[in-house]
Amino acid sequence: MADRFYTGLDWSDVRVFAALARHGSLSATARALAVNHATVARRFANLEQTLGAKLLERRPTGYKLTAAGRQALEAATAMEQSAAALKMLQAAPALAGLVRMTATPSVASYVIARLKPLQEMHPALDFEVTTERSRVSLPRHQSDIALRLGRPERGGILGRRVAKVGYGYYGTAEWRDRLNDGATPTLIGFDEAGAQFPEARWLAERFRGVRIGFRSNYQTGQIAAACAGLGIAVLPHFLAATEPTLVRLALPQKPPDRELWLLTRNDARNASPVRTVSDYLVDLMRRERALFEGR
């Protein structure tokens, strides 16, 4: 079979497993891959048989990864990235130039940590990432790509929704034990400069009277405070996942999700460097959907 590796793995089986792990159901996976339910079930069963391991457990809420499944999904994701890199190289002319991006500090850190494969594919492509809270203007050509939380509100901008960003309560294991013993939480929040952010407004409305023991206008500062044990922070799951010190805590009132959008100017969307970087980021974030949603 053309898609079968020398290891005995069939790439189609791996691709179906990765999609099933992310979508959680046969029907959603079948729709995403434009195949039928039987094909999804057959290919997933083939992979489990080939590996000799149970990768997913079927529960009332959908398929959930086992410990072996988590390892397999990590490997499958790396295989997808390699396949995407090879596809981008097909008859692709050498790209060169500077692509300027802007994002919040937390999203910028996520992107920067994942740019190396793109740099290896296009060695002459340069990157600039601005992490200002104040919005750098796309229409005024201050940036080529913007990653922003929230749907674009103005014309002349091409927007693609790339992720649903989930939030949770995070703190140290010590805070988890204190909460289990009935302690009142001390929260980590935003300072006056960050009071206009949706997360800050939600926190102020839902936790009136609860002590805010530490404030910062940046989530990078908040996560540092949470790691230091200064309190409990409401953080995006993808950011909290970078800190092994933090554990997810159970508090009432689930924080609301937000949408992450990738924006480009209409007049720049067909420029090869901008389009290449945009497509890379869109594909990357959609593959890492589980990371953003906290699953």
Image: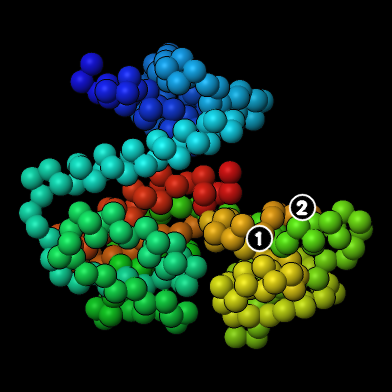
Taking the image as drawn, is residue 197 in sight?
no
Q: Amino acid at mark 2?
A: Ala
Residue extending farthest to the front is 7
Which residue is at a point 67% across and 59% down the rendered structure image?
Answer: 246
- Pick whichever, 26 or 67, lies toward us: 67
- Locate the C terminus and report the quarter of the image it occupies: top right
Tell me which colouring the rendered structure shows. rainbow
237 shown above or below 134: above
Label 2 sits on a secondary structure element that is loop
Q: Position of residue 139 (x, y in %)?
A: 27, 76
Q: Amino acid at mark 1?
A: Thr
- Locate the N terminus and report the quarter of the image it occupies: top left
Taking the image as drawn, is residue 98 in sight?
yes
283 shown above or below 12: below
Residue extending farthest to the bottom is 192
140 left or right, relative to 72: left
Residue 250's disc is 2
Tell me which label, 2 or 1, sits earlier in the chain.
Answer: 1
- Pick whichever, 250 or 173, lies toward us: 173
Instruction: Classify 10 Å Cα crowding around label 2: few (below 14), some (14-19), many (20 and above).
Output: few
Q: Position of residue 122 (x, y in %)?
A: 18, 58
118 left or right, relative to 170: left
Q: Position of residue 279 (x, y in %)?
A: 27, 53
- Pick whichever, 255 or 225, lies toward us: 225
Q: Which residue is mark 1?
A: 245
Residue extending farthest to the right is 182
